[in-house]
Amino acid sequence: MAACMVAWVMLVCILTDGCGHNPQPVTQETQTEAETPTGVEHAAEQARVPVSPNQAQTAAKEIRYIYQHDTKPVYTITTTADKAQARSETARKAAGADFSIVTDKSNPTAKKDLTQLPKGSTVELNQYNVQAYKQELHTVEVAPDLDSGKGVSEVGYTVQRKITKDGKYIGFGAAYNVDNHKTLAKVTYTW
């Protein structure tokens, strides 16, 4: 009986994605950390969003470019310490980002622990929103007529929406078969 209870608890932990570690979609880092693939991977791990090394490298390059060229990030947050986390989360959601990296605008070499600051103290943060996977994919399909070698046999269009953090999509589409004059409907799943 005890073994069944342990197995049940383990199953619940696995299905609910983990026993204790809640995803943290907003991660505070130094500017230097944010500009490295390791820093991006760390933020992605905290948010529980799997990213490839190539995705981490691309995001790190973009963050570095924004900072080095003094291009203002999409979100610069000026608020009080007690409201900073909530404001960052609101900005992340508004941007449609999978996760965000927040850095101290006034001191790029320090990681500001917002929980240690007096509640009313003013903070100014740079926020880099990372969208690891597009929210929606659109596909146009054209199939040549290989039998006769003349023109097009089928044309179609599909739209897919992201359904998981790791880039799985489900979608619906339609196609028209020129040869048979038939319209086709389809459901797609991409992983």
Image (spheres, rainbow, N blue to C red):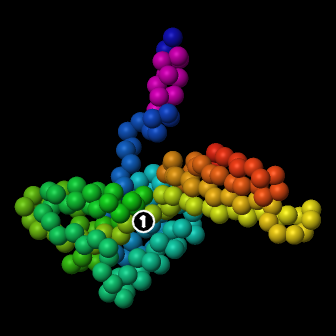
From the viewer's perspective, is 26 left or right of 81? Answer: right
Q: Is residue 147 magenta?
A: no
Q: Say which element carries label 1.
A: strand
Residue lying furthest bottom in this view? 69
| Residue 103 visible from this viewpoint | no
Q: Is residue 185 above or below residue 27?
A: above
Residue lying furthest left in this view? 120
Give how far across and how far down residue 41 sits, in percent.
47, 63
| Residue 160 visible from this viewpoint | yes
Give how far across and how far down residue 81 sits, in percent.
15, 61
Q: Residue at x 41, y 54 (%)?
A: 47
Q: Residue at x 51, y 28 (%)?
A: 11
Residue in the foreground of this view, choosing between 65 and 7 = 65
Magenta span: predominant SS is helix
Residue lying furthest front in this view? 181
Q: Which residue, given by chain and number where applicable, does mark 1 sit on? A: 130
Q: Is residue 47 above or below residue 63?
A: above
How crowded is the residue under tag 1: few (<14 C-alpha within 10 Å), some, or many (20+)? many
Q: Residue at x 14, y 56 (%)?
A: 82
Q: Is residue 12 magenta?
A: yes
Give how far across and how far down residue 137 sits, in percent.
56, 60
Q: Is residue 164 above or below residue 85?
A: above
Mark 1 is on which residue type?
Val
- Region of the chain picked out in magenta, as a range: 3-13
Q: Residue at x 51, y 52 (%)?
A: 162
Q: Number of numbered discs present?
A: 1
Residue in the foreground of this view, choosing between 138 and 96 = 138
